[in-house]
Amino acid sequence: MSLQSSAPFVVFGNATTANYPEGGGHWSVRLQYMFAMSELGIRWRWLEILRSSNDRDQDLYKTKTFLRRLSHYGFGGKVAVALLPKSAEMDLARAEIFGVPGDEAAGWIRDADILWNFCCSIKSPLLSQFKKRALIDLDPGHIQVSALRWDMEIERHEVLFTVGLKMADPDTASPTLGLTWIPFKPLVYLPMWKASQAGHADYAPFSSVTHWDWGGELPWEGRLLSISKRDAYLRYLDLPLRVDVPIELAVNLHWKDATGDRELLQKNNWRLVYPQTVGRSPSLYRRYVQRCGAELSCPKPVFRELRTGWFSDRSAAFLASGRPVLAEDTGFADHIPTGLGLVKFTNMYEAVSGIEEIASSYARHTKAARELAEEYFDALKTVRFMIDSC
């Protein structure tokens, strides 16, 4: 169903994708929005901010890769890169514009009914040039706690979307900053993630794609909240020793890594692959997800400890591919059915039991996974809801 007759003209604002050409999973998240908007007949444009690295060749490589890749998906002319000096204020007058003429990009800002601002990417003075602004929060709890110390300009948005499914619930422990947050489920554009024939759980690994952050903590109410995926997975360090199915991570631990973490994981039977090998583009990332038997998702501790209800866009992609998901609960189970297709855990015992349950009834879980994606994560349903909320 097209929404074209009543929908606003949406400009997406983002500042992470051009700078991360090898991040196939990251790119896939953004593509879900583009595909869904296009199928619904909504007029949209994408403004990507890229801060200069002071290496002209590197900046041009990232810019051209971004534009070439999106042209491949049919979005040429709908996207622009604003290359800004590293420390300049965010003003298009200071930027070099690629993809469309500079006056056309300026016209997007002037004509847009609303900005959808990913993760506070667009900042003043550019932010104030949009008539209306919606924030797309993909890091619930993290961004709100950070805003207590730094000016994130959150209050300058008229609409606040969050993938924290519990951010509107009274029992979330996250600060809300006195603002109204509208939860939404991660988008998965179903035609992009057609369910493929699943391998057998005995040899197709439980896996995930993740960064391995060695630090990062946020002070909150007298304690420190970890934002490190390293801390998340090390809570379950010996999990592969406790189960009979392979456990794998596509993680940025290069074979030359000198920290000892790579050896620590391998000693505990983790299989490791390099994400820039298996997922450096959206198509390779999709292929990797569909090669896996299921996902093992361990969220940043901040999501779990603040009970934000965060649920991964990557997990939604696994489900849409007919791959079961075993996910540590952040509170999402209050809003998404679990037990079949999606299994939650809160400790080592439940993680082991969850793997055994999925492996023993694999066909049932794979079928239920796709059904969950269709019911709860369909990008078309979610975009309609978000448009209505604007």
Image (tube, rainbow, N blue to C red):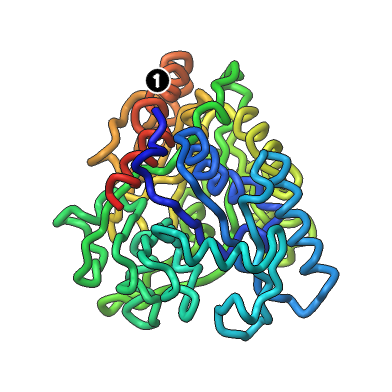
Residue positioned 47% across, 61% down in the render: 111
Q: Nearer the viewer, residue 62 or 112?
A: 112
x and y percentages locating residue 281 in the rendered image:
71, 44
Residue positioned 66% across, 81% down in the render: 86
Amino acid identity at mark 1: Ala
Quadrant location of the N terminus in the rendered image: top left
Q: Residue furthest left?
A: 170
Helix, strand or loop at mark 1: helix
Q: Nearer the viewer, residue 225 or 141?
A: 141
Q: Nearer the viewer, residue 51 or 220?
A: 51
Residue 304, compared with residue 268, is above or below; it is: below
In which quarter of the view is residue 277 placed?
A: top right
Residue 299, compared with residue 97, is above or below; it is: above
Residue positioned 54% across, 38% down in the render: 35
In which quarter of the view is residue 58 placed?
A: bottom right
Residue positioned 32% across, 79% down in the render: 148
Residue 92 visible in the current orientation: yes
Counting labels gives 1
Residue 371, compared with residue 30, is above or below; it is: above
* Disc 1 residue crowd, few under 14, some 14–19, many 20+, Cα 10 Å: many
x and y percentages locating residue 231 in the rendered image:
48, 60
Residue receiving disc 1: 368
Q: Classify residue 99 as left or right of residue 135.
A: right
x and y percentages locating residue 154 in the rendered image:
34, 71
Residue 192, compared with residue 313, is above or below; it is: above
x and y percentages locating residue 124 in the rendered image:
46, 79
